[in-house]
Image (tube, rainbow, N blue to C red):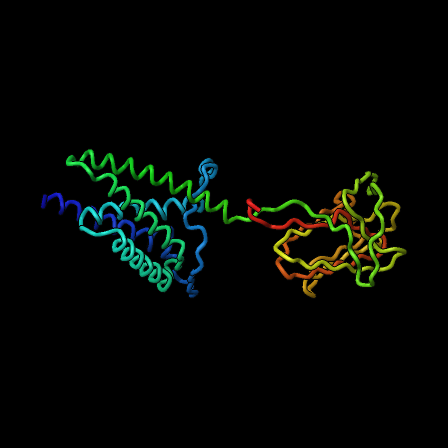
Amino acid sequence: MVKQRKNLLTVTILYTLFVLYFMFFAFGRGEASDHTVYTFIFMPDNFLLLPYPSDLLHPSLMSMVGFGNTLAFVPFGILIPWLYRVGFVRFITLFFIAILVLETIQALTFLGSFDINDALQNSVGAALGFGAYKLGFRYRSLGRNLVATAISGLVLFIALWGLGAAVDKILTKVEGPFTAITEWTDTSGNSSADKPDSIQINGQKIPLRSNLYGAEGGDSRTFTYKSEGQTIFSFTFGNPEPTDYSGEISITRDGQEILNYTGDFQRTNPEQYPVVYEMPVEPGDELKITIKGDLKVWDVGYKKMQYFWQ
């Protein structure tokens, strides 16, 4: 029994040194330590998320980081309670504190960054190992204990994999259905004109799905869109035939110009028109869309970013 404990302690120490090497010296960390910027990331995201099965078809270093951060620390959850009688709460608390200390040292020595997600993933891996140990070590035979622990660990890991994917789906927003802006008044108080069924651009008949906006007689009109939520704002634009390419469109967001197209672009690059323009808009953002000359915009609307259950 004493010999087994010594062997177990030796394995634990060697594995700890192995992990510390990867945390502080592997992946060229020493060569990158000459920078002088401390990096601390305190905001967690979905730290339970592991690469999707499709990511395994074309694995990359970045896609495997989640696996490494979790699986590399599973042995600690088995070895430490095997060596010492310790409850889960005490074990995981002390383990998490130790990981935070190591993450801080990484950042202060410029051998890595402090990332709360890494610390949480490391701790989840250790917790998974602890659970596998408690489920597996129920027999008098060491061999049966190890086999049961391995099977328990695999089952818990698959459950963790599925839980991370489910949480990711719950937390991730998706584009909702397209909502057309059918009544859009410009800054002068004029409402939109009736739209035809289609327009002609570069010899092609372009169907209009929902709306059409523009200036009449070469004048300028400015329309305003103020987002009431997180949305994807979109429209299509171009100079319909017949045209002398005198049209222009510009967009400002909260007073700062973010888009400007003139008819000369269409004259020199006719194959690129009509142009479909999309942009993400945050709550409270105000867009001003100014249309001049013959240029028209149509199918103007937005898609709200929402959770899948909404």
The one of 274 and 145 positioned closer to us in this rendering:
145
Q: Quadrant of residue 248?
A: bottom right
Residue situated furthest right in the rendering: 217
Residue situated furthest front in the rendering: 310
Q: Answer whether residue 268 is visible to the viewer in this image.
A: no
Decide if residue 118 is on the left or right side of residue 19.
right
Q: Quadrant of residue 293?
A: bottom right
The image position of residue 151, as x and y in percent, is 29, 35
Residue situated furthest left in the rendering: 2
Q: Where's the N terminus, which quadrant? A: top left
Q: Answer whether residue 22 is visible to the viewer in this image.
A: yes
Decide if residue 207 is on the left or right side of residue 37.
right
Residue at the spot 13% in from the left edge and 46% down from the top edge = 5
Decide if residue 120 is on the left or right side of residue 210.
left
Number of labels in the image equals 0
Residue at the spot 31% in from the left edge and 61% down from the top edge = 101
Up the image or down, 82 lies above or below 185; here it is above
The one of 269 and 67 positioned closer to us in this rendering:
67
The image position of residue 207, as x and y in percent, is 79, 40
The one of 48 and 264 positioned closer to us in this rendering:
48
The image position of residue 100, as x and y in percent, is 33, 59
Residue at the spot 42% in from the left edge and 50% down from the top edge = 47
Decide if residue 133 is on the left or right side of residue 207.
left
The image position of residue 51, as x and y in percent, is 44, 42
The one of 116 and 305 positioned closer to us in this rendering:
305
